[in-house]
Image (cartoon, grey):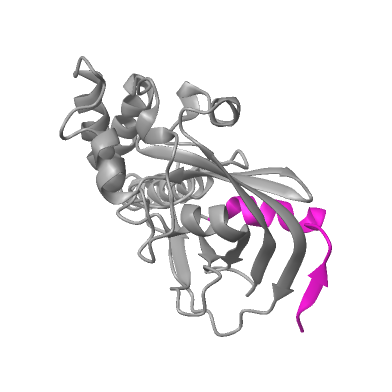
Amino acid sequence: MGKFYESIPPELVPWILKQEMFWVATAPLSSEGHVNVSPKGVRDCFHYLSPTRVWYQDLTGSGVETISHIRENGRITLMFNAFEGPPRIVRLFGTGTVHEFGTREYEELIPPEQRRPGSRAAIVVDVHKVGSSCGYAVPYYEFRGHRQALLDFFISRERADQNDEAAHAAKGLKAYWEEKNMRSIDGIPALQAAPKAAGVPSCTDVMKRAEASINGNVPVRANGSALSVKTGRSVERRRVEELVFAFALGVAVAAVYVRFVGVA
């Protein structure tokens, strides 16, 4: 049976932070407008601040519906669901606030060393209701790793702006924002400050992290546990498998020794 809470229960926080993706739903006020649902799946973009406040780092995409809808009416719902273990769906109902790249609020939430390539805003959600339900119909899926394509694409866009004297290259991030992210598909205004920001941050650190992911280095989850990007297996699980292999190898060697050499 579904349960509702006025804030995020403490026992749900570790589970929420463990999820590798979540969904964001918003809608315009017009009955003829398009309801939007967006999946979010880049690690360490979601953050928990308190039982009634969370935020996530909004990365650039070809659409900008969430920002447009929040600017118009503030309504937003975040949904998490379990793909492994016991079934569960959790929805965070709230009111959103957009802090664009180039604003003081954005910089306070996202220091340069934590900014991901293509990051355009911080979306803060003030939660007024939480819904938890069974999720019995959600199938099992095995997590194998995060895609690198979006980060790679916007690394190249940010490099273009970095190499341009005006920090506004024709193939840069700001030009992309101006082309794709100024209005929703219903014509509602979206980005305002980001395309006009004085510069773009150096993406040296984020490029190193992205390249480390490509090379198979182990990143860290928001809850502190490590996970292999390439295989999707936890480091703890890999260690157990290595110990099992070592034990099996030892047994095999001992058997061969007893058979051909004998026991003293």
- Please give the name of the residue rendered at 16% of the width and 35% of the height, measured from the top-left corner: 171
Q: What x and y, as percent, mark residue 79? A: 59, 65
Query: Is 2 inside the magenta-drawn segment?
Result: yes
- Please give the name of the residue rendered at 70% of the width and 77% of the height, measured from the top-left corner: 133
Q: Is residue 66 left or right of residue 147?
A: right
User: Which residue extends farthest right?
Assistant: 6
- Please give the name of the residue rendered at 29% of the width and 46% of the height, measured from the top-left corner: 150
Query: Is 6 inside the magenta-drawn segment?
Result: yes
- Please give the name of the residue rendered at 35% of the width and 20% of the height, measured from the top-left corner: 199
- In the image, 252 versus 117, the foreground residue is 117
- In the image, 146 versus 154, the foreground residue is 154
- Locate the N terminus by quadrant: bottom right
Q: Is residue 185 above or below residue 30?
A: above
Q: What x and y, as percent, mark residue 81? A: 58, 68
- Locate the C terminus by quadrant: top left
Note whether residue 215 is visible.
Answer: no
Quarter location, residue 172? top left
Q: Which residues are magenta?
A: 1-19
User: Which residue extends farthest left?
Assistant: 170
Q: What x and y, as percent, mark residue 45? A: 51, 43
- In the image, 72 versus 257, the foreground residue is 72
The tally of labels here is 0
User: Which residue extends farthest top?
Assistant: 165
Q: Is residue 215 left or right of residue 22?
A: left
